[in-house]
Amino acid sequence: MKICILGTGFAALTAIKETRKRLPNAQIQVIGPCKELIYYPSLIWMPSGLRQADDLRIDLHNFFNRQRVEFIQASVTGLSADGRSVQTDQGEFDNEGLIIASGGRFIKKLPGIEHAITPCEGIPAAQHITDRLKGMDSGTIAIGFGGNPNEPAAMRGGPMFEFLFGIDTLLRQQGRRDKFKLVFFNPASEPGKRLGDKFPEKLKVMLAKKGIESHLGHKVVGFEANKVKTEGGELDADLILFMPGMTGPAWLDNTALPKSAGGMIKADNDARVKGMDKVYVAGDAGSFEGPAWQPKQAHAADIQAKTAAHNLTVDFEAKGEKIQIKHELICIVDTLSHGMLIRRTESGTLMLPPCRLMHYAKRFFEGWYLRQYR
Ligand SMILES: Cc1cc2nc3c(=O)[nH]c(=O)nc-3n(C[C@H](O)[C@H](O)[C@H](O)COP(=O)(O)OP(=O)(O)OC[C@H]3O[C@@H](n4cnc5c(N)ncnc54)[C@H](O)[C@@H]3O)c2cc1C
C-alpha cells in the first residue's frame, strides 16, 4: 500500500514513525519543500545567543533512510476530490492513504505588517530580532499577538510571552534594561486565557514585577514604521514583534476539502478529514472537534499525527479499534532564566510558578526530542 504524508514538520515526522511502526511494508512517500525540520520552540533563544540558526535546522536525510521514506522535494498545490492524487509544482502523485501535515499559514493582512517582525516566519525572523536588538542602544520594544476572528483556536500566543520575558531577562543580563521600555499589546483584555483561567492574573503580576507596560483590550488595526495602531490609540515603538492569527494552507483554495470557519481543514475527532475516505489531517493545518482551548502546538500536532496514523492503518487492515484525539495543552513558558509549566487537559489545569528547573527542563527536552531525528 502507498501512503503519502504532506510536510516535514512535527506532525509529518510523527506520522511517518507511527505509520512505519504499524505498517512495516508500506510504501511511504513524503512531499515537502525541503528535507529538514525546523525546531520552532527554541527560536526564542536566538536573540540571547543560547541557540544559533544551525542548531534549529535538522537535516532529515538519515531519518528518512532509517524509516525507508521516499522523499519528493515539491510543494503541494492541490488535491483531487477523492484525495487520491496530490498535485504539486513537480507533478501529480497518487496514494492509497493520505495524511496532510503541511502546517498552517499566518494572516498577514494588517496594513503596514511589514513594519513588524513576525516570529512565525522562523529562523530568518528570529535572526532579524537578534540583529535589531544588537543594533539598539535604547528605545521602545512592542510585542503582541493577534487571532483569527473566525476561529479562536487559530492563534499562537505562548511564544510571544516567551520573547517578551526573554528580551526582558536578556536586557537585564546585559545591564541595559533601564534604557528600554517594553510594551505588551493584545486585543484581548485577558490575554492567555486559553493557557488556563488563572493565567491572565499571573501574567498581570509578572508584567508589573518586570516593569513591562501593557496595552490590552484594543483591536490592532495596523502598523507604521515606528507605530502600532490600535482601536484604543497608537503606541510608539522602535521595534515591533507581532504574531498574527492563523489560517489554513494556501493550497486548500484549489481543493474541495472541507474548511472550518477560520480556513483550516475540518476534521473529526479521530483526525479524519470530514467526509473523506483514508484522508487524515494533523497539526496546524487542521481544525478538530473538541475543547475551545485546543492549542496550535507541536505537542498537539504529535498527538493528532499519532491518532491519524493509527486510524489510517485501521482503515487498511480492517481490524483494531479507531482512537480519538486526546486533547492536551502542555508547555513551558520560558523567560530565559526560569520556566512556567502549564498543562491543560479535559480534567483540569496545572500551572506551576516560574522556576529555574523548568528553564533547564525545556532545554533538556529539546535535545531529548530531537535525538530521534538526528
Ligand atoms: C516561535 C515559536 C515557538 C513555539 N514554541 C512552541 C513550544 O514551546 N511548544 C510547542 O508545542 N509548540 C510550539 N510552537 C508551535 C509549533 O512549532 C507548531 O504548532 C508546530 O510547528 C506545528 O507542527 P506542524 O507539523 O503542523 O506544522 P509545521 O511545523 O509548520 O510543519 C509544516 C510542514 O509542511 C511543509 N509545507 C508547507 N507548505 C507546504 C506545501 N505547500 N507542500 C508541502 N509541504 C509544505 C513545511 O515545509 C513544513 O515541513 C512554536 C511556534 C513558534 C513559531
Image (spheres, rainbow, N blue to C red):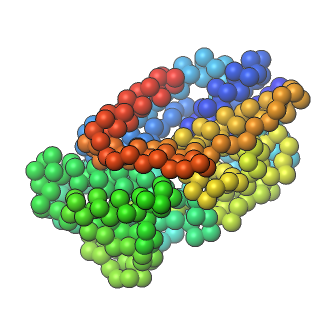
Is residue 243 visible in the rendered image? The answer is no
User: Viewed as shown, does residue 92 lie left or right of 163?
Assistant: right
Percent position of residue 358, x then y = 34, 38
Residue 255 vertical position relative to residue 141 in the rendered view, above or below:
above
Percent position of residue 308, x then y = 72, 38
Residue 300 vertical position relative to residue 257 in the rendered view, above or below:
above
User: Viewed as shown, does residue 218 lie left or right of 237?
Assistant: right
Percent position of residue 49, x then y = 25, 39
The quarter of the displayed image where residue 144 is located: bottom left
The quarter of the displayed image where residue 50 is located: top left
Residue at x 45%, y 71% (from the top left corner): 188
Point out the residue furthest to the right here: 318
Is residue 373 visible in the rendered image? The answer is yes
Residue at x 71%, y 27% (from the top left corner): 19
Point out the residue furthest to the front here: 347
Residue at x 41%, y 27% (from the top left corner): 367
Residue 3 vertical position relative to residue 168 in the rendered view, above or below:
above
Query: What is the number of callouts on the image?
Result: 0
Of residue 105 and residue 187, the one placed in the foreground of this image is: 187
Percent position of residue 260, x then y = 70, 61
Of residue 347 and residue 299, the one placed in the foreground of this image is: 347
Picture quarter with the N terminus: top right
Residue at x 69%, y 21% (from the top left corner): 21
Of residue 126 and residue 332, the one placed in the foreground of this image is: 332
